[in-house]
Image (cartoon, rainbow, N blue to C red):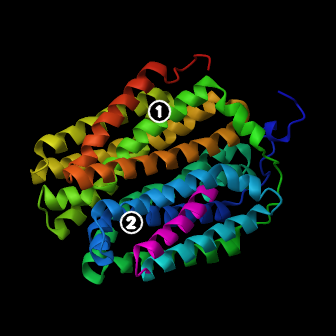
C-alpha cells in the first residue's frame, strides 16, 4: 500500500496535543439524542401503528428506514463532506436530528413519519462514522480510550432511558410527546456543541478505493457477516418486543414500561461487562452475548405467556446486547489496523443494514405468524452468528 496515501496516516499520532473535554461531552450528548430517537419506536410501536392506521409490522419499518439510510450515510458522508470543517458538519447533523424529531412529533401519516426517520438515518450514520476520528483530534493519544468511553456513555444512558420513558410518556401524554422530548434534547445538544466544539478543519481525504480494498480482506468480510447475523437477530426481537408483551404475555402498559426499564438497566451494566470481556477476548464477548440472546429468545417462544419469564428474559437480553458494540468495534480494528477509520465506517454501515434486515424480517414474520415472529427470527440469526464468530472470530495473538 502506497505510503503517500493520506488515509493511511496514523490518526492517533496526529491527535490533539491538548484536551477538549467539554467538546467530548457534547459528542456524548449527541450520541444520547441519536440513540434515544432511534430506540423510541420499539416502546411506542403499538400506539404509533394505531394512530397512523397501519399494522405493527408496517410501523416497525420506521426502524428500517432509519437503518437503511444510515447504512448509506456512514461510509458516504465523510467522502461528501471532506472539504468542510468537521465542526460545521457535526452541527449540521444535530440540526437534521432536530428536524427529524419535529417531523416525527407532528406526523399525520406514515409517509411523514418515514421522512422523519430518513432524516434521522442521515444524522445517525454521519455522526457515528466521524465520532471516533473527532475524538482522536480532541484529546491527546493517551486519553483517547477514556474519551471514547465518555462518548459511549451516551449510548448506555439512552439505553436505560429511551424505551421505558418512551412507553410511559406515550401512555400519559401520547406517543408524540416522546418525540417532543427527543426534540428538546437535540436542541440542547445543538446549544452545547455550538459552545464547545472547536474549529476542526478537514484533514483526512478518504476515498472509495480504501473501502473497496477493505472489502477484499477476508477478516473484514467475516466480521461484517457476523454483524449482519447477530445484530439483525437482536433487532428482529427487540423491535417487536412490545407487541409480544401485549399480545402474548398480556402485560399492562405500566408493567411494560417497568420491563423495558429492566432492559435498559440490563443494557447499562451489559455495556460495562461487555467492554471488560471484549478487552480480553472480543470473540468470546460476541459469542457469549449472541448465545445468551438466542437462548432468551427461545424461552420467549416456549414460555412467553409467563410474565416472569418475559420480564427476566427481556432484562437479560439488554445485558447480553452490551457485549456487541465494543466487541465488534475491537474486531474490525484488529482486522484492519492500518485503516481503522475506513473499517469503522464499514462497521457502522454493517450495523445499520443488520438493523434494517432485522426490522424487515421480524416485521414480515410478525404480520404473518404473530408477535412470536420476532423471537423466532432472533433464534435462527443469533445462533448462526454466534457459531460463525466462534469458528472464525479473532483470537488473541493470532495473525489476522
From the viewer's perspective, is residue 133 above or below residue 399? Answer: below
Q: Which residue is label 2 attached to?
A: 40
Q: Determine if residue 269 is in view.
A: no
Give the position of the C terminus as an image quadrant.
top right
Q: Which residues are magenta?
A: 107-126
- The quarter of the picture where residue 384 lies is top left
Q: Residue sitting at 81 percent across and 45 percent down?
A: 14
Q: Which residue is label 1 attached to?
A: 226
Of helix, strand and loop, which mostly describes the magenta segment? helix
Q: Horizontal and vertical percent for residue 379?
A: 28, 37
Instruction: Say whether residue 327 is magenta.
Output: no
Element type at mark 2 = helix
Horizontal side, residue 335 vs residue 78: left or right: left
Q: Residue sitting at 78 percent across and 46 percent down?
A: 206
Q: Earlier in the sequence, mark 1 or mark 2?
A: 2
Horizontal side, residue 77 vs residue 349: left or right: right
Amino acid at each position: 500500500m502506497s505510503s503517500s496515501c493520506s488515509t493511511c496516516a496514523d490518526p492517533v499520532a496526529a491527535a490533539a496535543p491538548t484536551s477538549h473535554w467539554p467538546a467530548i461531552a457534547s459528542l456524548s450528548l449527541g450520541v444520547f439524542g441519536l440513540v434515544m430517537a432511534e430506540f423510541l419506536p420499539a416502546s411506542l410501536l403499538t400506539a404509533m401503528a394505531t394512530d397512523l392506521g397501519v399494522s405493527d409490522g408496517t410501523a416497525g419499518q420506521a426502524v428500517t428506514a432509519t437503518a437503511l439510510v444510515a447504512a448509506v450515510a456512514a461510509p458516504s458522508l465523510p467522502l461528501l463532506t471532506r472539504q468542510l470543517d468537521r465542526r460545521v458538519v457535526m452541527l449540521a447533523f444535530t440540526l437534521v436530528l432536530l428536524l427529524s424529531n419535529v417531523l416525527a412529533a407532528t406526523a399525520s401519516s406514515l409517509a411523514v413519519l418515514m421522512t422523519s426517520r430518513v432524516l434521522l438515518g442521515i444524522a445517525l450514520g454521519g455522526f457515528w462514522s466521524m465520532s471516533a476520528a473527532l475524538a482522536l483530534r480532541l484529546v491527546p493519544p493517551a486519553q483517547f480510550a477514556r474519551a471514547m468511553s465518555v462518548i459511549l456513555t451516551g449510548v448506555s444512558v439512552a439505553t436505560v432511558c429511551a424505551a421505558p420513558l418512551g412507553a410511559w410518556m406515550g401512555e400519559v401524554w401520547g406517543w408524540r410527546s416522546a418525540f417532543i422530548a427527543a426534540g428538546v434534547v437535540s436542541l440542547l445538544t445543538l446549544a452545547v456543541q455550538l459552545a464547545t466544539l472547536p474549529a476542526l478543519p478537514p484533514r483526512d481525504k478518504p476515498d472509495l478505493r480504501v473501502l473497496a480494498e477493505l472489502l477484499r480482506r477476508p477478516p473484514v468480510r467475516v466480521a461484517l457477516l457476523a454483524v449482519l447475523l447477530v445484530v439483525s437477530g437482536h433487532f428482529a426481537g427487540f423491535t417487536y418486543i412490545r407487541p409480544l408483551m401485549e399480545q402474548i404475555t398480556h402485560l399492562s402498559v405500566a408493567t411494560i414500561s417497568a420491563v423495558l426499564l429492566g432492559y435498559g438497566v440490563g443494557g447499562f451494566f451489559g455495556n460495562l461487562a461487555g467492554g471488560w470481556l471484549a478487552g480480553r477476548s472480543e470473540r468470546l464477548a460476541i459469542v457469549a452475548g449472541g448465545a445468551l440472546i438466542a437462548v432468551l429468545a427461545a424461552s420467549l417462544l416456549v414460555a412467553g405467556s409467563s410474565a416472569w419469564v418475559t420480564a427476566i428474559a427481556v432484562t437479560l437480553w439488554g445485558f447480553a446486547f452490551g457485549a456487541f458494540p465494543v466487541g465488534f468495534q475491537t474486531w474490525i480494528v484488529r482486522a484492519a489496523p492500518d485503516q481503522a477509520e475506513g473499517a469503522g465506517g464499514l462497521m457502522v454501515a454493517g450495523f445499520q443494514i443488520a438493523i434494517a434486515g432485522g426490522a424487515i424480517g421480524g416485521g414480515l414474520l410478525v404480520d404473518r405468524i404473530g408477535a412470536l415472529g420476532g423471537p423466532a427470527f432472533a433464534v435462527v440469526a443469533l445462533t448462526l452468528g454466534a457459531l460463525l464468530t466462534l469458528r472464525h472470530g479473532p483470537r488473541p495473538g493470532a495473525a489476522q
